[in-house]
Image (tube, rainbow, N blue to C red):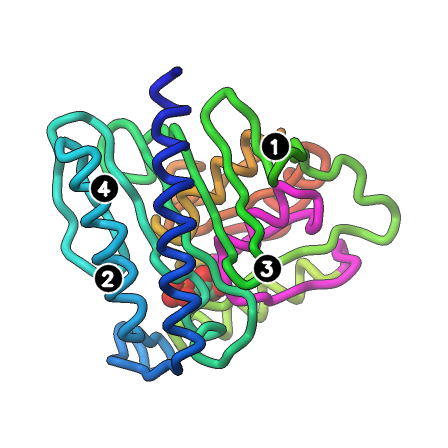
């Protein structure tokens, strides 16, 4: 078995267990534990518990690897592999009981930096719908037995475009201005509230595109691999790669249209 497939197998097992734990905690009731970058940027006790669970499982199975997660301090490893983890992506949905949140786990090679890493394996698991999206480098993107591919032709109506607005109020006015430029090429827009699921939706052909400014590496590491393995294009900033400055994902035909319009 290749290293990428080995990492994918481990990520899949841990994501399923972590998702079951998060789902159980959701059913028991959710309380907000703290706010982070803004009043709307919340963390629940479950986010912390689920990340601690994932981290402990990874440390047990692959003690030489690094860790880069949303809720705890990053740690460098010695193996060249780093795990990039969002225990609950879509925390606001989770807190409100909206069934659009996911466990996102990626294994990347190289520096723990979106500008230079190479993703080897990625899993996005929504425990409410029981959908587990997975991809390994060179091995395609999959939902169960179904191989995923992005849409190719958005047609005259334009693309169905997913986006998000982030938590920083200072970015909202420019984001709305950007959205007004996207609308003429969009059939419609969706703001689902979990970047990892937006990217998984692009990979699965449920959306034609996704873009967002201000996301963190753990929001898009696994989802970006899903999109590229499903034949999609990725871009953004810094460095023309998905990053804090911008993430764009779409099929080859629609990508350049969106990329030019966004003008980030
Ligand atoms: C958030 C979600 C949301 C996106 C935010 C992210 P979190 O992740 O992915 O869709 O708009 O930028 O921070 O905080 O729920 O893990």
Magenta span has 189? yes
Mark 3 residue element: loop
Q: Where residue 69 appears, x then y in whole percent? A: 26, 52
The earlier-in-sequence mark between 1 and 3 is 3
Mark 1 residue element: loop
Label 3: how many Cα within 10 Å (few below 14, some 14–19, many 20+): few
Q: Which mark is residue 129?
A: 3
Disc 2 from disc 4: Cα separation: 15 Å
Left or right, 78 with reference to 173: left
Mark 2 residue element: loop
Instruction: Work out whether residue 15 or residue 205 is closer to the camera in this orientation and state it.
Output: 15
Residue that carries the numbered disc 1 in the rendered image: 230
Ligand 1 resides in the quarter of the picture at: bottom left
Q: Where residue 257 appears, x then y in whole percent? A: 68, 43
Residue that carries the numbered disc 4 in the rendered image: 58
Query: Which residue occupies 59% across, 35% down?
Result: 142
- Can you tell which of label 1 and label 3 is closer to the viewer? 3
The earlier-in-sequence mark between 2 and 4 is 4
Instruction: Give the residues drawn in magenta, as a range.
Output: 184-212
Disc 2 from disc 1: Cα separation: 29 Å
Residue that carries the numbered disc 2 in the rendered image: 71
Left or right, 230 with reference to 62: right
Contact? badges 4 and 1 (CB < 8 Å): no
Query: Which residue occupies 86% across, 53% down?
Result: 157
Query: Which residue occupies 66% across, 60% down?
Result: 181
Q: Where residue 111 appears, x then y in whole percent? A: 22, 32
Disc 3 from disc 4: Cα separation: 25 Å
Q: Is residue 119 above or below residue 13?
A: above
The earlier-in-sequence mark between 3 and 2 is 2
The earlier-in-sequence mark between 4 and 1 is 4
Q: Is residue 6 above or below residue 127?
A: above
The earlier-in-sequence mark between 3 and 4 is 4
């Amino acid at each position: 078995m290749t290293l990428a497939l080995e990492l994918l197998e481990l990520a899949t097992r841990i994501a399923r267990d972590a998702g079951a734990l998060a789902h159980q905690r959701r059913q028991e009731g959710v309380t907000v534990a703290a706010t982070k970058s803004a009043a709307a940027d919340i963390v629940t006790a479950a986010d912390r518990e689920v990340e601690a669970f994932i981290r402990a499982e990874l440390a047990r199975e692959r003690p030489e690897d690094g860790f880069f997660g949303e809720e705890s301090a990053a740690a460098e490893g010695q193996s060249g592999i780093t795990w990039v983890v969002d225990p609950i992506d879509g925390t606001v949905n989770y807190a409100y009981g909206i069934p659009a949140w996911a466990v996102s786990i990626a294994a990347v090679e190289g520096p723990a930096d979106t500008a230079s890493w190479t993703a080897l394996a990625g899993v996005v698991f929504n425990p409410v719908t029981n959908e587990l999206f997975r991809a390994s480098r060179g091995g395609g993107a999959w939902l169960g037995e179904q191989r995923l591919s992005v849409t190719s032709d958005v047609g005259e109506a334009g693309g169905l475009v997913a986006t998000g607005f982030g938590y920083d109020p200072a970015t909202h006015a420019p984001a709305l201005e950007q959205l007004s430029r996207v609308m003429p090429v969009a059939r419609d827009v969706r703001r689902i509230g979990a970047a990892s699921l937006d990217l998984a939706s692009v990979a699965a052909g449920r959306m034609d595109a996704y873009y967002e400014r201000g996301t963190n590496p753990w929001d898009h590491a696994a989802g970006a691999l899903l999109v590229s393995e499903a034949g999609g294009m990725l871009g953004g900033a810094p460095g023309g790669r998905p990053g804090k400055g911008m993430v764009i994902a779409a099929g080859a035909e629609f990508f350049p249209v969106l990329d030019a319009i966004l003008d980030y």
